[in-house]
Image (cartoon, grey):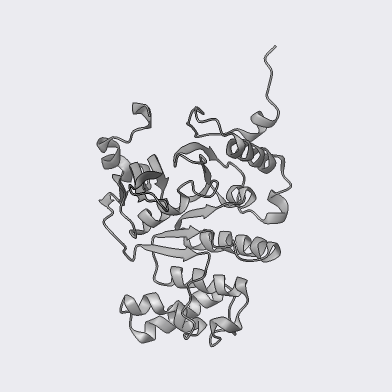
Amino acid sequence: MTNANKIEINEIEKKSEDNIKIVVENLSKNFSVKSLGEKKAKEFTALKDFNIQVKEGEFLTIVGPSGCGKSTLLDILAGLSKPSTGEVYIDNKLLKGPALDRGIVLQGYALLPWRTVRQNIEFGLEIKKTPKSERKAISDKFIGLVGLVGFEDRLPNELSGGMKQRVAIARALAYDPEVLLMDEPFGAVDAQTRDLLQDELLRIWEKTNKTIIFITHSIDEAVFLADRVVVMSGNSGEIKEILKVDLPRPRNVGDVRTSPGFNWIKHHVSELLHNNDENYKKKVVSNVDVAEAISPSTTI
């Protein structure tokens, strides 16, 4: 990796001026893996020299094949795992472990089955020791925000998959984290529900202005939601390319996915994911002029 791709310390000190929320600096994560019948463990690299800066209020999606290190990165950002090398800064502070400044939404909902919708949403507030009277007002707000009014006293086994994911999102937002980490949250629902949840998530994001890092296998989902898409390489745990999604907001599924700009970016991401050349040169595309890319101007 060239020096241009390294994040220097003086850049980290300046990041508040540039509205940067998260700095990931030279991050790598290795695991020792012992195969059946082998005496000596081998080292497996899940992430390698991962560098990125995420702006406050940005919606960043990360897409890549299985095993490319997406979820490993999210575990490190959540403070659930420590990197082998490198550092993460949030608001210019070194990340050292889990904290209430980050909310997590997983594919499997992770709802407590004995607690009602309201009680699940208030769980983080209880940990935060928010007074009971305030908890009800806050849970009412987020129950309304995710469209679950009338379902406050239902248990998880009485809800559809889409409704369970709405509860998980409301729970993550209720204790007011500054960063929302989402690991394939819509992967377990049907296609129609997934489209509805994507629209709802964008509506919620526009109202709350949270910084969101969203992991997905779906190219359509990655491009539709994002300000920028990080494309991961298949087996080396590295960034292949970062694309700016310069499509107008607010967005809805029906309009955006039929636009030429969306389909050009989607096609480019697909080409990157299917290019297995290990010598592929990583680059950052900070400004993709979609119209120019689709129909290049010619100079006479």
As drawn, 164 above or below 199: below
Q: 212 or 114: nearer the eye?
A: 114
Question: In the displayed structure, does residue 59 sit left or right of residue 52?
Answer: right
86 left or right, relative to 225? left
Q: Determine the image quadrant of residue 99.
A: bottom left
Rendered location of residue 238, percent (x, y): 44, 39
* Residue 145 visible in the shown view: no
Q: Quadrant of residue 195?
A: bottom right
The residue lying at 33 percent from left, 27 percent from top is 3
* Viewer-closest of 229 and 174: 229
Q: Is residue 250 visible?
A: yes
Above or below: residue 235 compared with residue 143: above
Quarter of the picture containing the N terminus is top left
Viewport quadrant of the C terminus:
top right
Q: How many marks?
A: 0
Q: Position of residue 268 (x, y in %)?
A: 63, 36
Residue 103: image x %, image y %? Answer: 41, 64
Quadrant in the rendering for residue 253: bottom right
Question: Is residue 84 placed above or below 196 in the rendered structure?
Answer: above
Residue at the image point whose x is 40% and y is 52% from the top: 37
Task: Tell me what residue is drawn at x 39 percent, y 45 percent.
Answer: 44
Instruction: Please tell me which residue lies in front, 56 or 95.
Output: 95
At x 53%, y 88%, the residue is 153
* Residue 270 percent location from the top left of the image: 63, 40
